[in-house]
Structures are given as C-alpha cells and as structure tokens.
Image (tube, rainbow, N blue to C red):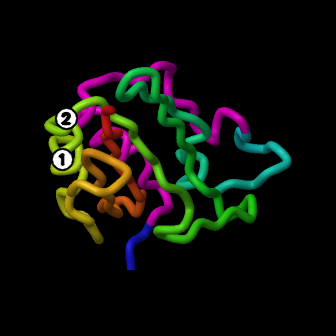
Amino acid sequence: MLELSGKFEEAFDVYKSVFDTDYITPIARMGEIFPRGSEVDLSDFERNGLVNMELSVVGSHLLMAGDMIDSLGQKVSIGNSTTTNLELDDVDGARDFHEALSQGAIFCAQPSQTPWTSLWGAGLDRFGIRWMFNVILQN
C-alpha cells in the first residue's frame, strides 16, 4: 500500500523539477502553527508536516498542498482525493509532462486523441496524485 502521509514535500520536489519552476512562498510546517505546548499535541513527525506549499506550474496554474495530520482527524484515500487537470496549448508539451509524471506511476492512460481534445492523458503518479492532461481541439 502506498503511504501518503508526509510525502507532499517529496512530491513537490519532483513537480518542481518536472515543471522547471520554484516555490512561490516559503514552505510552512505544522510546528509553526502548533508549537510544542500548544492546545494540539503533535508528534515530531506531524510537527514537521506541511501546512502549505505553493508551486507555480504551467501558465497561471498554481499547485498548493499540505499534509494530512492524524492527530487532527485528517485522512486521505489514494486516488480519490483530487485530480489535477492541466489545460495545455501544445501536444508535445503535454506528452513531455505526462512522461515525466508517469515515472513510477501506479496507473497511466496513455495520451491519445479524443473527440473533445487534440490530446488527453491521465495517470496516478507514484505519490498517489491523479493527473489529467488536455490539449483542447483548435477550430
């Protein structure tokens, strides 16, 4: 079984490389929000968890994430938590992103033309995040 807890920083380091970009703001950790002795008693592992991180990707798309914290009653299920859809302008770029994010993927629908797009592809990456890529048909 794929473990999601504490994986967003690792995932975003991969996404940073794939999209050739950088973090927009400093990474914020749970320990900054809930320091030792606060009303919420977090483990050291949870205290190091992410409250927020932001990464600029294609165009004006912005990815934001934070870890789920067991002590706060948060749970996530792999594959149904979210789908990140990228609307792209060119087929080659979409294929490149799909290939990069498919490394070690759990599931991949290979990019292909559909009745509604010039190219569509999807996959569940090695971090349990589902991606879709669309290049819209030009009339």
> What residue is rendered at 51% in x and 33% in y?
53
Q: Residues within 10 Å of mark 2 (few under 14, many from 20)?
A: few
Looking at the picture, how far across and down is residue 93, in whole percent? Answer: 19, 35
In the rendered view, would you say 70 is above or below 64? below
Per the rendered image, the range of residues in magenta is: 4-33
Specify the label residue 19 is tagged with.
Answer: none
Give the residue furthest to the front: 139
Residue 59 sits inside the magenta stretch: no
Residue type (three-letter) at the residue carrying disc 1: Ala
- Circle 2 sits on which residue? 93
Q: Amino acid at mark 2?
A: Gly
Label 2 element class = helix
Circle 1: element type: helix
Front label number (2 vs 1)? 2
Whole-percent x, y for residue 51 in the image: 61, 40
User: Is 12 drawn above or below residue 70 in the view shown?
Assistant: above
Residue 96 position, x and y percent, is: 16, 41
In the drawing, what numbered circle is on residue 100? 1
Q: Residue at x 16, y 50 (%)?
A: 99
